[in-house]
Image (tube, helix red, strand yellow):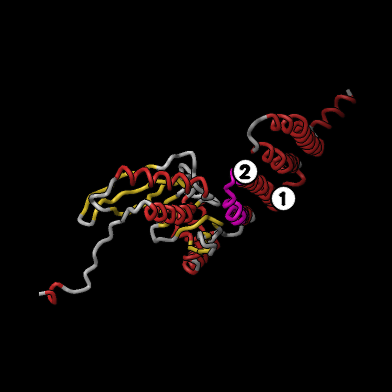
Amino acid sequence: MAYESIFDGMLQSDYLWAAFWIVFAFIIAKAFSVFMKRFAYAAAKKTRLTLDDRLFPAIRRPIMYIIMVVGIYLAVMNVSALVPYHPFLVPTIYIIGIVFSALLVLRVGDSVLIWYTERRTTRQETVYTEVMPTVQKVWTMIVALVALVMALGRAGIEIGPLVTSLGIAGLAVALAFQDTLANFFAGIYLTTNRAMKKNQFIKLDTGLEGYVETVDWRNTKLKSPGGQIIIVPNVKVSQAVITNFHEPVKSYPFLVSFLVRPDADLEKIERIALEAAEKTIKSTPGADGKYPPLFRVNELNEYGVKVSVIVQADEYAQQYLIKHELLKELLKRFRKERIHLSCPRIDLVPDAQKK
Protein backbone atom coordinates (compact mmCIF):
# COMPACT_ATOMS: atom_id res chain seq x y z
CA MET A 1 0.00 0.00 0.00
CA ALA A 2 2.85 2.37 0.78
CA TYR A 3 4.36 1.78 -2.65
CA GLU A 4 1.00 2.35 -4.32
CA SER A 5 0.52 5.65 -2.52
CA ILE A 6 4.00 6.76 -3.50
CA PHE A 7 3.32 5.79 -7.14
CA ASP A 8 -0.02 7.61 -7.11
CA GLY A 9 1.69 10.64 -5.68
CA MET A 10 4.28 10.57 -8.44
CA LEU A 11 1.56 10.37 -11.10
CA GLN A 12 -0.16 13.35 -9.54
CA SER A 13 3.11 15.34 -9.38
CA ASP A 14 3.12 18.38 -11.66
CA TYR A 15 6.87 18.29 -12.05
CA LEU A 16 6.85 14.65 -13.14
CA TRP A 17 4.35 15.41 -15.91
CA ALA A 18 6.38 18.46 -16.89
CA ALA A 19 9.51 16.32 -17.14
CA PHE A 20 7.54 13.73 -19.10
CA TRP A 21 6.41 16.25 -21.71
CA ILE A 22 9.92 17.67 -22.11
CA VAL A 23 11.50 14.22 -22.47
CA PHE A 24 8.71 13.07 -24.79
CA ALA A 25 9.15 16.14 -27.02
CA PHE A 26 12.91 15.58 -27.07
CA ILE A 27 12.44 11.94 -28.11
CA ILE A 28 9.96 12.89 -30.85
CA ALA A 29 12.29 15.61 -32.15
CA LYS A 30 15.27 13.24 -32.13
CA ALA A 31 13.25 10.51 -33.85
CA PHE A 32 12.15 12.99 -36.50
CA SER A 33 15.78 14.03 -37.07
CA VAL A 34 16.92 10.40 -37.41
CA PHE A 35 14.06 9.64 -39.80
CA MET A 36 14.95 12.62 -41.99
CA LYS A 37 18.66 11.75 -42.11
CA ARG A 38 18.36 8.01 -42.66
CA PHE A 39 15.23 7.68 -44.76
CA ALA A 40 13.94 11.01 -46.15
CA TYR A 41 17.33 12.19 -47.48
CA ALA A 42 17.97 8.84 -49.15
CA ALA A 43 14.49 8.79 -50.69
CA ALA A 44 14.94 12.34 -51.97
CA LYS A 45 18.15 11.41 -53.79
CA LYS A 46 16.31 8.66 -55.68
CA THR A 47 13.68 11.00 -57.11
CA ARG A 48 14.13 13.00 -60.30
CA LEU A 49 12.93 16.17 -58.59
CA THR A 50 15.81 18.09 -57.00
CA LEU A 51 13.57 20.31 -54.86
CA ASP A 52 13.26 17.73 -52.08
CA ASP A 53 17.07 17.46 -51.91
CA ARG A 54 17.13 21.08 -50.76
CA LEU A 55 13.84 21.15 -48.89
CA PHE A 56 14.36 18.26 -46.47
CA PRO A 57 17.68 19.49 -44.98
CA ALA A 58 16.25 23.00 -44.72
CA ILE A 59 13.18 22.04 -42.66
CA ARG A 60 14.74 19.44 -40.34
CA ARG A 61 16.09 21.72 -37.59
CA PRO A 62 13.19 24.24 -37.50
CA ILE A 63 10.67 21.41 -37.09
CA MET A 64 12.79 19.90 -34.31
CA TYR A 65 12.83 23.25 -32.51
CA ILE A 66 9.06 23.66 -32.90
CA ILE A 67 8.48 20.20 -31.39
CA MET A 68 10.67 21.12 -28.42
CA VAL A 69 8.79 24.41 -27.94
CA VAL A 70 5.49 22.50 -27.87
CA GLY A 71 6.94 20.18 -25.23
CA ILE A 72 8.07 23.12 -23.10
CA TYR A 73 4.64 24.73 -23.44
CA LEU A 74 2.88 21.54 -22.25
CA ALA A 75 5.35 21.26 -19.35
CA VAL A 76 4.72 24.84 -18.22
CA MET A 77 0.95 24.40 -18.45
CA ASN A 78 1.11 21.29 -16.19
CA VAL A 79 3.04 22.91 -13.32
CA SER A 80 0.54 24.58 -11.01
CA ALA A 81 3.31 26.51 -9.27
CA LEU A 82 3.96 28.38 -12.53
CA VAL A 83 0.36 29.55 -12.98
CA PRO A 84 1.10 33.02 -11.54
CA TYR A 85 3.87 33.39 -14.11
CA HIS A 86 1.71 32.33 -17.09
CA PRO A 87 1.09 35.94 -18.24
CA PHE A 88 4.84 36.17 -18.85
CA LEU A 89 5.84 32.59 -19.71
CA VAL A 90 3.05 31.75 -22.18
CA PRO A 91 3.57 34.80 -24.45
CA THR A 92 7.32 34.19 -24.31
CA ILE A 93 6.89 30.59 -25.45
CA TYR A 94 4.48 31.75 -28.17
CA ILE A 95 7.04 34.29 -29.42
CA ILE A 96 9.77 31.64 -29.51
CA GLY A 97 7.39 29.39 -31.46
CA ILE A 98 6.64 32.24 -33.87
CA VAL A 99 10.38 32.76 -34.44
CA PHE A 100 10.99 29.09 -35.26
CA SER A 101 7.84 28.94 -37.43
CA ALA A 102 9.05 32.00 -39.34
CA LEU A 103 12.43 30.30 -39.75
CA LEU A 104 10.67 27.24 -41.17
CA VAL A 105 8.63 29.30 -43.65
CA LEU A 106 11.72 31.32 -44.61
CA ARG A 107 13.79 28.21 -45.29
CA VAL A 108 11.02 26.62 -47.36
CA GLY A 109 10.72 29.77 -49.48
CA ASP A 110 14.51 30.10 -49.90
CA SER A 111 14.79 26.45 -50.92
CA VAL A 112 12.09 26.85 -53.57
CA LEU A 113 13.68 30.06 -54.93
CA ILE A 114 17.18 28.57 -55.05
CA TRP A 115 15.89 25.39 -56.70
CA TYR A 116 13.96 27.43 -59.28
CA THR A 117 17.02 29.59 -60.01
CA GLU A 118 19.32 26.59 -60.44
CA ARG A 119 16.75 24.88 -62.66
CA ARG A 120 16.57 27.89 -64.97
CA THR A 121 20.34 28.37 -64.94
CA THR A 122 20.90 24.79 -66.09
CA ARG A 123 18.65 25.62 -69.03
CA GLN A 124 20.95 28.52 -70.00
CA GLU A 125 18.44 31.05 -68.65
CA THR A 126 21.04 32.81 -66.50
CA VAL A 127 18.95 35.99 -66.37
CA TYR A 128 17.25 34.43 -63.35
CA THR A 129 20.44 34.74 -61.31
CA GLU A 130 20.23 38.53 -61.63
CA VAL A 131 16.76 38.92 -60.10
CA MET A 132 16.37 36.02 -57.67
CA PRO A 133 18.79 37.35 -54.99
CA THR A 134 16.64 40.47 -54.74
CA VAL A 135 13.49 38.34 -54.60
CA GLN A 136 15.03 36.35 -51.74
CA LYS A 137 15.73 39.56 -49.80
CA VAL A 138 12.16 40.76 -50.32
CA TRP A 139 10.86 37.34 -49.18
CA THR A 140 13.02 37.54 -46.04
CA MET A 141 11.72 41.02 -45.25
CA ILE A 142 8.08 39.95 -45.67
CA VAL A 143 8.45 36.87 -43.43
CA ALA A 144 10.34 38.87 -40.78
CA LEU A 145 7.74 41.64 -40.83
CA VAL A 146 4.82 39.21 -40.42
CA ALA A 147 6.63 37.39 -37.61
CA LEU A 148 7.39 40.70 -35.87
CA VAL A 149 3.75 41.81 -36.01
CA MET A 150 2.56 38.44 -34.65
CA ALA A 151 5.17 38.51 -31.85
CA LEU A 152 4.24 42.04 -30.83
CA GLY A 153 0.59 41.04 -30.75
CA ARG A 154 1.38 38.11 -28.43
CA ALA A 155 3.48 40.40 -26.25
CA GLY A 156 0.42 42.58 -25.66
CA ILE A 157 1.67 45.53 -27.69
CA GLU A 158 -1.00 47.33 -29.68
CA ILE A 159 -0.14 46.68 -33.32
CA GLY A 160 -2.95 48.71 -34.92
CA PRO A 161 -1.06 52.03 -34.93
CA LEU A 162 2.13 50.19 -35.94
CA VAL A 163 0.43 48.58 -38.92
CA THR A 164 -1.04 51.95 -39.91
CA SER A 165 2.37 53.60 -39.64
CA LEU A 166 3.97 50.83 -41.69
CA GLY A 167 1.25 51.21 -44.32
CA ILE A 168 1.82 54.95 -44.59
CA ALA A 169 5.59 54.47 -44.69
CA GLY A 170 5.22 51.77 -47.35
CA LEU A 171 3.03 54.05 -49.46
CA ALA A 172 5.58 56.86 -49.18
CA VAL A 173 8.42 54.54 -50.18
CA ALA A 174 6.37 53.16 -53.10
CA LEU A 175 5.71 56.68 -54.38
CA ALA A 176 9.32 57.74 -53.94
CA PHE A 177 10.66 54.65 -55.73
CA GLN A 178 7.82 54.24 -58.22
CA ASP A 179 10.05 53.91 -61.28
CA THR A 180 12.50 51.61 -59.49
CA LEU A 181 9.73 49.31 -58.26
CA ALA A 182 8.08 49.30 -61.68
CA ASN A 183 11.35 48.24 -63.30
CA PHE A 184 11.94 45.64 -60.59
CA PHE A 185 8.57 43.93 -61.08
CA ALA A 186 8.92 44.27 -64.86
CA GLY A 187 12.25 42.44 -64.57
CA ILE A 188 10.57 39.63 -62.63
CA TYR A 189 7.85 39.45 -65.30
CA LEU A 190 10.41 39.28 -68.11
CA THR A 191 12.38 36.48 -66.46
CA THR A 192 9.39 34.38 -65.44
CA ASN A 193 7.54 34.90 -68.72
CA ARG A 194 10.55 33.57 -70.66
CA ALA A 195 9.89 35.85 -73.63
CA MET A 196 13.64 36.02 -74.15
CA LYS A 197 16.75 34.28 -72.88
CA LYS A 198 20.40 35.14 -72.58
CA ASN A 199 22.29 35.29 -75.92
CA GLN A 200 19.07 35.39 -77.94
CA PHE A 201 18.72 38.08 -80.61
CA ILE A 202 15.63 40.26 -80.17
CA LYS A 203 14.23 43.40 -81.77
CA LEU A 204 11.90 45.88 -80.06
CA ASP A 205 9.17 47.80 -81.85
CA THR A 206 11.23 50.95 -81.17
CA GLY A 207 13.89 49.65 -83.57
CA LEU A 208 16.44 48.68 -80.90
CA GLU A 209 17.92 45.24 -81.47
CA GLY A 210 20.68 43.07 -80.08
CA TYR A 211 21.64 39.98 -78.11
CA VAL A 212 20.23 39.70 -74.59
CA GLU A 213 23.07 40.13 -72.10
CA THR A 214 21.36 40.49 -68.72
CA VAL A 215 18.00 41.32 -67.16
CA ASP A 216 18.75 42.78 -63.72
CA TRP A 217 16.49 44.45 -61.16
CA ARG A 218 16.31 47.71 -63.16
CA ASN A 219 17.53 47.39 -66.77
CA THR A 220 17.78 45.00 -69.69
CA LYS A 221 21.13 45.05 -71.46
CA LEU A 222 21.37 44.25 -75.16
CA LYS A 223 24.52 43.85 -77.22
CA SER A 224 24.12 45.23 -80.73
CA PRO A 225 25.63 43.45 -83.77
CA GLY A 226 28.33 46.14 -83.72
CA GLY A 227 29.29 45.31 -80.13
CA GLN A 228 27.70 48.30 -78.38
CA ILE A 229 25.78 47.78 -75.11
CA ILE A 230 22.21 49.08 -75.19
CA ILE A 231 20.61 49.65 -71.77
CA VAL A 232 16.80 49.69 -71.77
CA PRO A 233 14.59 50.06 -68.65
CA ASN A 234 12.68 46.87 -67.89
CA VAL A 235 9.35 48.71 -68.09
CA LYS A 236 10.06 49.77 -71.68
CA VAL A 237 10.96 46.21 -72.64
CA SER A 238 7.89 44.70 -70.96
CA GLN A 239 5.62 47.16 -72.78
CA ALA A 240 7.29 46.75 -76.18
CA VAL A 241 6.40 44.38 -78.99
CA ILE A 242 9.34 41.96 -79.02
CA THR A 243 10.44 39.94 -82.02
CA ASN A 244 12.59 37.02 -80.93
CA PHE A 245 14.70 35.82 -83.87
CA HIS A 246 15.81 32.70 -81.99
CA GLU A 247 12.31 31.34 -81.37
CA PRO A 248 10.97 28.93 -82.45
CA VAL A 249 14.01 28.34 -84.71
CA LYS A 250 17.32 30.14 -84.79
CA SER A 251 17.88 30.18 -88.57
CA TYR A 252 16.61 33.23 -90.44
CA PRO A 253 15.64 33.51 -94.14
CA PHE A 254 16.09 36.86 -95.86
CA LEU A 255 15.68 38.39 -99.32
CA VAL A 256 18.15 40.04 -101.66
CA SER A 257 16.01 41.92 -104.20
CA PHE A 258 16.91 43.79 -107.40
CA LEU A 259 15.31 45.07 -110.62
CA VAL A 260 15.99 43.77 -114.13
CA ARG A 261 14.76 45.05 -117.46
CA PRO A 262 11.36 43.85 -118.70
CA ASP A 263 12.97 42.24 -121.77
CA ALA A 264 15.60 40.36 -119.72
CA ASP A 265 15.95 36.58 -119.92
CA LEU A 266 14.54 35.59 -116.51
CA GLU A 267 15.57 31.94 -116.83
CA LYS A 268 19.18 32.95 -117.41
CA ILE A 269 19.03 35.44 -114.54
CA GLU A 270 17.57 32.74 -112.26
CA ARG A 271 20.38 30.33 -113.11
CA ILE A 272 23.09 32.92 -112.55
CA ALA A 273 21.52 34.18 -109.32
CA LEU A 274 21.22 30.66 -107.84
CA GLU A 275 24.80 29.82 -108.81
CA ALA A 276 26.02 33.02 -107.17
CA ALA A 277 23.95 32.29 -104.05
CA GLU A 278 25.27 28.71 -103.76
CA LYS A 279 28.84 29.94 -104.08
CA THR A 280 28.23 32.59 -101.41
CA ILE A 281 26.67 30.06 -99.03
CA LYS A 282 29.69 27.76 -99.30
CA SER A 283 32.26 30.52 -98.78
CA THR A 284 30.57 32.79 -96.21
CA PRO A 285 30.51 32.02 -92.45
CA GLY A 286 27.02 32.06 -90.95
CA ALA A 287 25.20 30.85 -94.07
CA ASP A 288 22.92 27.86 -93.51
CA GLY A 289 23.80 25.32 -96.18
CA LYS A 290 20.98 22.96 -95.20
CA TYR A 291 18.51 25.09 -97.15
CA PRO A 292 19.13 25.64 -100.88
CA PRO A 293 18.68 29.20 -102.18
CA LEU A 294 15.45 30.13 -103.95
CA PHE A 295 14.70 32.53 -106.79
CA ARG A 296 11.37 34.31 -106.99
CA VAL A 297 9.83 36.87 -109.40
CA ASN A 298 8.03 39.37 -107.16
CA GLU A 299 6.34 41.96 -109.36
CA LEU A 300 6.29 43.84 -112.63
CA ASN A 301 6.23 47.63 -112.39
CA GLU A 302 7.02 50.68 -114.48
CA TYR A 303 10.74 50.36 -113.81
CA GLY A 304 11.16 46.68 -114.66
CA VAL A 305 10.82 43.25 -113.08
CA LYS A 306 11.53 42.91 -109.38
CA VAL A 307 13.15 39.59 -108.47
CA SER A 308 14.58 38.17 -105.24
CA VAL A 309 17.04 35.57 -104.06
CA ILE A 310 16.09 33.91 -100.75
CA VAL A 311 18.99 32.74 -98.59
CA GLN A 312 19.01 31.22 -95.10
CA ALA A 313 21.35 32.48 -92.36
CA ASP A 314 22.27 30.59 -89.18
CA GLU A 315 20.81 33.49 -87.21
CA TYR A 316 19.39 36.96 -87.77
CA ALA A 317 22.52 39.01 -87.14
CA GLN A 318 24.60 37.05 -89.70
CA GLN A 319 22.45 38.10 -92.65
CA TYR A 320 24.39 41.33 -93.19
CA LEU A 321 27.69 39.70 -94.13
CA ILE A 322 25.93 37.13 -96.32
CA LYS A 323 23.97 39.86 -98.09
CA HIS A 324 27.18 41.84 -98.63
CA GLU A 325 28.99 38.90 -100.21
CA LEU A 326 25.97 37.84 -102.28
CA LEU A 327 25.49 41.30 -103.79
CA LYS A 328 29.16 41.44 -104.76
CA GLU A 329 28.96 38.03 -106.40
CA LEU A 330 25.73 38.91 -108.24
CA LEU A 331 27.17 42.14 -109.65
CA LYS A 332 30.31 40.30 -110.70
CA ARG A 333 28.34 37.61 -112.55
CA PHE A 334 25.92 40.09 -114.15
CA ARG A 335 28.81 42.20 -115.38
CA LYS A 336 30.47 39.12 -116.85
CA GLU A 337 27.24 37.93 -118.54
CA ARG A 338 26.41 41.47 -119.74
CA ILE A 339 23.12 41.55 -117.86
CA HIS A 340 21.98 45.07 -117.09
CA LEU A 341 19.92 45.94 -114.04
CA SER A 342 17.00 48.31 -114.26
CA CYS A 343 17.27 51.58 -112.35
CA PRO A 344 14.44 54.10 -111.83
CA ARG A 345 14.96 57.29 -113.79
CA ILE A 346 15.40 60.33 -111.58
CA ASP A 347 14.29 63.50 -113.33
CA LEU A 348 16.13 66.50 -111.87
CA VAL A 349 14.18 69.03 -114.01
CA PRO A 350 10.66 69.79 -112.72
CA ASP A 351 7.79 69.29 -115.18
CA ALA A 352 6.90 72.98 -114.96
CA GLN A 353 10.35 74.03 -116.29
CA LYS A 354 10.08 71.52 -119.14
CA LYS A 355 7.01 73.30 -120.42
Q: Amino acid at mark 1?
A: Leu
Q: Which mark is residue 294?
A: none
Pointer 1 local density, CA inside 10 Å: few below 14, some 14–19, many at least 20:
some
Which secondary structure is most common in the magenta stretch? Answer: helix
Q: CA distance from mark 2 to mark 1?
A: 49 Å
Q: Quadrant of the C terminus?
A: bottom left
The verdict on residue 130 being magenta is: yes
Q: Over which residues does the magenta segment extend?
A: 121-145
- What residue do we see at 78% from left, 38% from top? 22
Left or right: 279 as drawn, with respect to 295: right
Q: Amino acid at mark 2?
A: Thr
Q: Which mark is residue 122?
A: 2
Q: Are marks 2 and 1 in contact (CB under 8 Å)?
A: no
Residue 67 x/y as whole percent: 72, 39
Residue 140 x/y as whole percent: 62, 54
Residue 74 x/y as whole percent: 72, 39
- What residue do we see at 27% from left, 49% from top? 264
Q: Return the disc, 2 or 1, that comes first in the chain's sequence.
A: 1
In this figure, what is the number of numbered marks? Answer: 2
Say if residue 212 shows up in the picture.
yes
The verdict on residue 334 being magenta is: no
- What residue do we see at 57% from left, 59% from top? 158
Instruction: Indicate the secondary structure of the residue bearing disc 1.
Output: helix
Pick whichever, 112 or 271, lies toward us. 271
Taking 1 as reference, is 306 above or below it? below
Residue 280 x/y as whole percent: 47, 48
Q: Which mark is residue 89?
A: 1
